[in-house]
Image (cartoon, rainbow, N blue to C red):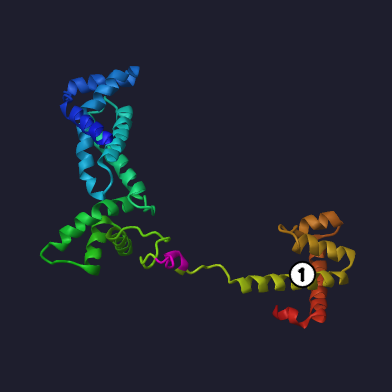
Amino acid sequence: MIEDKARRTMIRAAMKAPYLERGEEHELALRWRDHRDQAAMHRITTAHMRLVISMATKFRYFGLPIGDLIQEGHVGLLEAAARFEPDRDVRFSTYATWWIRASMQDYILRNWSIVRGGTSSTQKALFFNLRRLRAKLAQGPGMLSGEALYKEISTALGVSESDVAMMDSRLSGPDTSLNAPLVDDGGGSADRMDFLVSDDPLPDEVVGEAIDDERRSGWLKNALHVLNERELRIIEERRLQDEGATLESLGETLGISKERVRQIESRALQKLRVALVKESPAFLSA
């Protein structure tokens, strides 16, 4: 109640604020730019608050509080005033309109749904123009609907038909909580979350994979005993490290050529393969 009264007071004050003539507006903008005159900034923004209120009413159909829209628009107005270049032949209201609209649109995109929508320029255009274009095309002579309607909208806004269909689906219904019961019978029925399919492996698969990994590690540990000291070092450095050593670096360490290292590695791998198959024929299919 207090907030509504404060908002009405602010709107009345904004509507009573005097308009600025071009010369006066230019002088105030210069005082802010050159001297950071806060009084000049206040007069500019106060004179243009009616622009913020007017634009906020255009976005009221998104269901967000008009007071919040006005506050966000005021942020955009302040940003415009801080950035305005008075030497350019542009009225402040023309320049500020873009900043006010952008600030309100960003606020709507952040708060209209708990699911964050696309924030690219094309997605913004789709979000804010879909309903208007849909109503316009649906009432035209051809009475477009379905895929034909999506095609016309995608052409008009420069987005794909799939994006139009997805956004239309989002705008057609409210958000639904995954914790909401499927049946509102007061008896504690299952939530929607309970019916989501998980991509994680099943518990028996996790256990089976762990057992197989442990078995393969045991086979490899036993097979490593068939290698001599130099073969074992090369295999450990090249194959059993997260970042295997290069043939060249190992050659320098061992005092041999990198080609010789490659030959020893190849021979050691063959010996390991034979030992692993001998110890467990099932290794080849593991």
Question: Over which residues does the magenta segment extend?
Answer: 187-194
Residue 155 as seen in the image, left or right of residue 275: left
Q: Given the current orientation, which residue lies at the most extreme bottom position?
A: 281
Q: Amino acid at mark 1?
A: Ser
Residue 207 as seen in the image, left or right of residue 259: left
Q: Per the image, is 193 magenta?
A: yes
- Which residue in the structure is indicated by mark 1? 217
Helix, strand, or loop for circle 1? Answer: helix
Q: Given the current orientation, which residue lies at the most extreme left position?
A: 141
Q: What secondary structure characterizes most of the magenta part?
A: loop
Residue 263 as seen in the image, left or right of residue 242: right
The residue at the point 20 percent across, 29 percent down is 14
Measured along the vertical axis of the image, is residue 10 above or below residue 105? above
Q: Per the image, is 130 magenta?
A: no
Q: Indicate the position of residue 284 as horizontal and vertical percent values.
A: 73, 80
Q: Indicate the position of residue 95 as horizontal and vertical percent values.
A: 25, 34
Residue 269 as seen in the image, left or right of residue 92: right
User: Would you identify the image quadrant in which residue 239 lies?
Assistant: bottom right
Query: In which quadrant will I find the C terminus?
Result: bottom right
The answer, for residue 91, to whether it is visible in the render is no
Badge 1, how many Cα within 10 Å: few under 14, some, many 20+? few
Measured along the vertical axis of the image, is residue 259 above or below residue 30? below
The answer, for residue 17, to whether it is visible in the render is yes
User: Would you identify the image quadrant in which residue 86 lies?
Assistant: top left
Name the one closer to the observer, 268 or 248: 268
Measured along the vertical axis of the image, is residue 142 above or below residue 125? below
Query: In which quadrant will I find the N terminus?
Result: top left
User: Would you identify the image quadrant in which residue 201 lies?
Assistant: bottom right
